[in-house]
Image: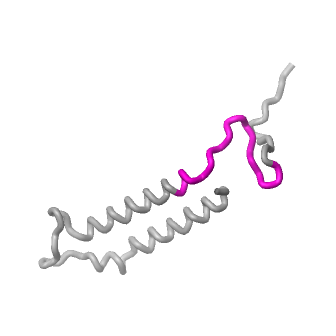
């Protein structure tokens, strides 16, 4: 998976997290005196922490699906599979 694809997926995930944690959806879970409480925790808190945990897990899975960076100072590009990176190039001194 390319860096651009990872960035796109991360941006979409961030926007989804913002939408899911926005006030109109949060008002669906506002506790009233008759709202059911699960395991002593109000539904609003369960929703907020559930969405938060799901976003973190999804971002972890996106990053984990990306290929590891090579350790030898090369950068894989579509045109040149092993192009040396200028910031990691070793210059020999006399």
Q: How is the image coloured?
A: one colour
Tell me which residue sits at (35%, 78%) in the image. 25
Question: Does 81 lie within the magenta span?
Answer: no
Residue at screen point 39% across, 71% down: 21
Q: Is residue 4 above or below residue 37?
A: above
In the image, what residue occupies the spot 43% across and 62% down? Answer: 55
* SS assignment for the magenta stretch, majority: loop
Q: Position of residue 2 (x, y in %)?
A: 67, 57
- Residue ranking furthest to the right: 94
Q: Residue at 19% of width from left, 64% of height from top?
A: 41
Quarter of the image for residue 56 reads bottom left
Where residue 1 appears, as percent x and y from the top left, is 64, 57
Residue segment shown in magenta: 62-80
Reply above or below: 3 against 28. Answer: above
Disc count in the image?
A: 0
- Residue placed furthest toward the left: 33
Q: Residue furthest top?
A: 94
Q: In which quarter of the image is residue 19?
A: bottom left
Taking depth in this image into account, of 30 and 68 the one nearest to the observer is 68
Please provide percent x and percent y for residue 52: 38, 62
Residue 8 located left or right of residue 59: right
- Frontmost residue, 23 versus 36: 36
Up/down of 88 relative to 78, above or below: above
Quarter of the C terminus within the rendering:
top right
Relative to residue 30, is residue 77 drawn left or right?
right
């Amino acid at each position: 998976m390319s860096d651009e694809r990872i960035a796109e997926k991360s941006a979409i995930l961030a926007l989804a997290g913002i939408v899911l944690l926005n006030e109109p959806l949060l008002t669906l879970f506002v506790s009233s005196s008759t709202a059911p409480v699960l395991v002593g925790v109000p539904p609003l808190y369960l929703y907020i922490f559930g969405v938060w945990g799901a976003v973190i897990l999804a971002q972890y899975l996106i990053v984990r699906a990306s290929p590891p960076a090579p350790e030898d100072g090369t950068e894989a590009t579509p045109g040149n599979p092993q192009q040396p990176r200028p910031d990691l190039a070793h210059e020999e001194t006399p």
